[in-house]
Image (tube, rainbow, N blue to C red):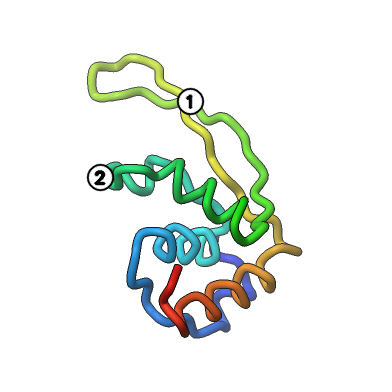
Amino acid sequence: IMHQLSINTELQPPSNNNQEVLYKAIQTGKVSIMDFPNLSGFRTRVSNLRHDYGIKFKEHRQRSKNKFNRTISYVVHSLPEDEIPRAISIYNSITDNSTF
């Protein structure tokens, strides 16, 4: 489900992995390793957003089955509604100077 605020907000396309993770979180309200199966260092990107920019993700574990029908679990990082305006502001500032 897309957040209403992000639907009405134009964002520049991301130009690096950190920006891409934040972009996805803003657009969908959540992000997980399942969104980026080929991104090495996904958890580092989430950590960077938390520690460097103070993004306040909420976490919960999700269970799924892998291709061998084994149960796996992973963390879904949700972006609370009240955090979205700040996340958009941060995203715009880091895409403007692209030093993220």
* Residue located beneath label 2 in the image: 38
Q: Tell me which corner region of the image, top left, top right, bottom left or bottom right, holds residue 97.
A: bottom left
**Secondary-structure class at tag 1:** strand
Name the side, left or right, on which 37 lies relative to 29.
left
Residue 25's x, y, as percent? Answer: 52, 59
Residue 46's x, y, as percent? Answer: 51, 48
**Secondary-structure class at tag 2:** loop
Which mark is drawn over residue 63? Answer: 1
Name the side, left or right, on which 32 lies relative to 78.
left
Which residue occupies the extreme right position in the image? 82
Relative vertical location of residue 75 with respect to residue 48 in this rendering, above or below: above
Q: Residue at x 55, y 65 (%)?
A: 26
86 vs 64, nearest the viewer: 86
Q: Residue at x 62, y 68 (%)?
A: 87
Residue 21's x, y, as percent? Answer: 44, 57
Image quarter where the N terminus lies is: bottom right
Image quarter where the C terminus lies is: bottom left
Q: Residue at x 43, y 73 (%)?
A: 99
Tell me the CA gap for discs 1 and 2: 19 Å
